[in-house]
Amino acid sequence: MKKYNRIFICAVMAIVFTASCGSPEHQQTQASDMAATGGMTDTEDMTGTGSITHTDNMAGTGNIANTDNMTGTGNIANTDNMTGTGNIANTDNMAGTDNKTDTDNVTAITGDKAEFAEVPMSRVTVHDPSVVYDNGTYYIFGSHMAWAKSTDLQNWERFTTNINTEYEELFGAEWESWCKTDSNPELKGNLWAPDVIYNEKMGKYCMYMSVNGDDWNSVIVMLTADQIEGPYEYGGPVVYSGFDAGKKHPADLTDVYRVLGEGTDLTRYQSTTNTKLNAIDPCLTYDEDGNLWMSFGSWFGGIYQLKLDEETGLRDYHTTYETIPNESDAYYGHKIAGGFGVSGEGSFLIHSGGYYYLFLSYGGLTATGGYQIRVFRSEDINGPYVDEAGNPAVYQKPSNNLYTNIGVRLMGSYDWTGSREIRVAQGHNSAYVTEDGQIFLIYHSRFAGGKYGIDEAHEVRVQQLFINKNGWLTAAPYEYAGETISDTGYPMEEMCGEYEYIVHTPTSYYRKSGKDYIGIEQAVRITLQEDGSVTGELSGSWSYKEGSANMSVTIDGITYEGVFLKMPSEQLFEDENERKVVMTFTAIGGNIAVWGSK
């Protein structure tokens, strides 16, 4: 931005900052109905294509698009074991979306009345990004063999491994014997949501890949490598799904009878309201005792967790489990979430501050499918996991959980002055806890109205997470731009003042209703007064803890606990790399997240 333009903007901001609290009317839109669903799409390396590729385990779904390496594609379908989800879309490696430079290291530019920062961003499209840190670099591994890396969580670049060219050799055995069907003949579009972890006992990087079948006949396969970027070698299968005692998907092609015994009744594994699930979306976690666990599953029968053998990286056959409804299963292990056909996938676990935090993605993954991140916690890695209100992550009956306040929803779709885009369907996240305790949330997001002319375009976004005084995670209001939270708190004059205020209503999500789109939360204006009162369009009180960033705000009888954080906003200026630095707050209360931004 030219100097005279910056002076002009700062002058305008000075006028705004000294104005009264009066502001245009703002409204908050909440969800009312769930959109009907239609047919799914998954395209790879396509140019000018149409028609259907394949569908998976769908009941009442439709128009679910999942496009890979796409240039001018059309109507290509791939569904992900979803029931009643709607218009589910996933675009990877799209023309014109990778390495988009918005801008590196935050450099403050201070005007008379406003502070600015140079924040370069290079964008990538990696669906279902799973993060791992190695020797100063953050790596994300995603569906459809999309990988990227960054040293600062802001500027990403794509890379390839031998998997991109050798996937048929690496996954061909399980694909040909278990997953491939006439209705689902291509392996390339069925490599989903891997997770990578360094196994210290093996001295190897272990990748766990979902190899998807279209009738729940899926398998998670492990690969190993000496270096994180490969080359990767075949390790073996870890867990299967979709098996039966008949000829369709015979269990004797799996390890099921090895675990359960020959002739075991497999009836429950054919019921989607009982134990039938899709063995995809692995997450690998070491517990505090050094035991290695893998959570997995998608929708239907729920999310389970198995103990692995650290010596092999595969299933620990010496650890056994009882079959107890809604608690555990002899083959799948501990049940930690979901069940009874409810939505939920992409489980991810971290440990911090004495708790294991479980992230789940509810809803369908398209822009209008209601995809969203919910969080639960437990003191034990195998649960029980509960939200702030004490609701368990494991369901006891069928439910459309897009319309429930079960699980703390980290963020919805919203629009305020600090926005340069309206993010929707944020989900399938991973998270990373640094050695000094910083927590980063990494997820993919779609956008209201699409991006780059693609309705279902998606990109990776990163936001910091903080633990409030009650031990709950709350997300920074803007994407990570190198900011750090103050260890000693902020001056009164920085905390006080007028804020835009967003409530992330758990049951609201972006979708079409008639001719209009609804579900985008709008900000209201409040002022945090020096006397501890909250005035403006809402009223209440606020407080802070001396010598720390901790704060609380009480509005409409609900007290939200969180932190103040000074950081660059995402407001768009003439120079897209220039960002205004503002005071914000983020808090959780009543199982609901709220944000404020000056």
Image: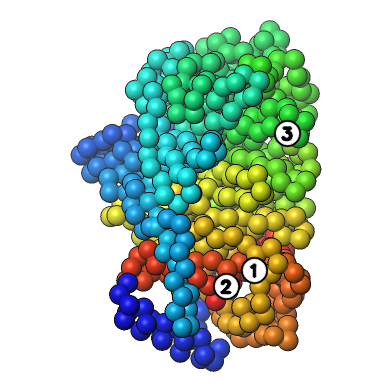
Residue 542 coordinates in the image, percent (x, y) = 72, 77
Q: Tell me the tag on residue 564.
A: 1
**Inter-mark Cα distance, 2 to 3:** 36 Å
Residue 398 coordinates in the image, percent (x, y) = 65, 44
Residue 204 visible at all = yes
Image quadrant where residue 403 sits = bottom right
Q: Quadrant of the C terminus?
A: bottom right
Nearer-N-terminus badge (3/1): 3
Which three-letter amino acid code belongs to the residue tagged 3?
Asp
**Inter-mark Cα distance, 1 to 2:** 7 Å
Nearer-N-terminus badge (1/2): 1
- Name the residue that disc number 2 marks: 583
Residue 1 coordinates in the image, percent (x, y) = 32, 72
Contact check, label 1 and label 2, Cβ < 8 Å? yes
- At mark 1, the secondary structure is strand
Nearer-N-terminus badge (2/3): 3
Crowding around mark 2 (Cα neighbors within 10 Å: few <14, some 14 to 19, many 20+) is some
Say which residue appears at 75% left-offset and 45% top-offset: 355
Q: In this view, does 9 lie to the left or right of 483?
A: left
Compared with residue 582, is residue 170 higher up or lower down, i.e. above or below? Answer: above
Which three-letter amino acid code belongs to the residue tagged 1?
Phe
- Name the residue that disc number 3 marks: 287
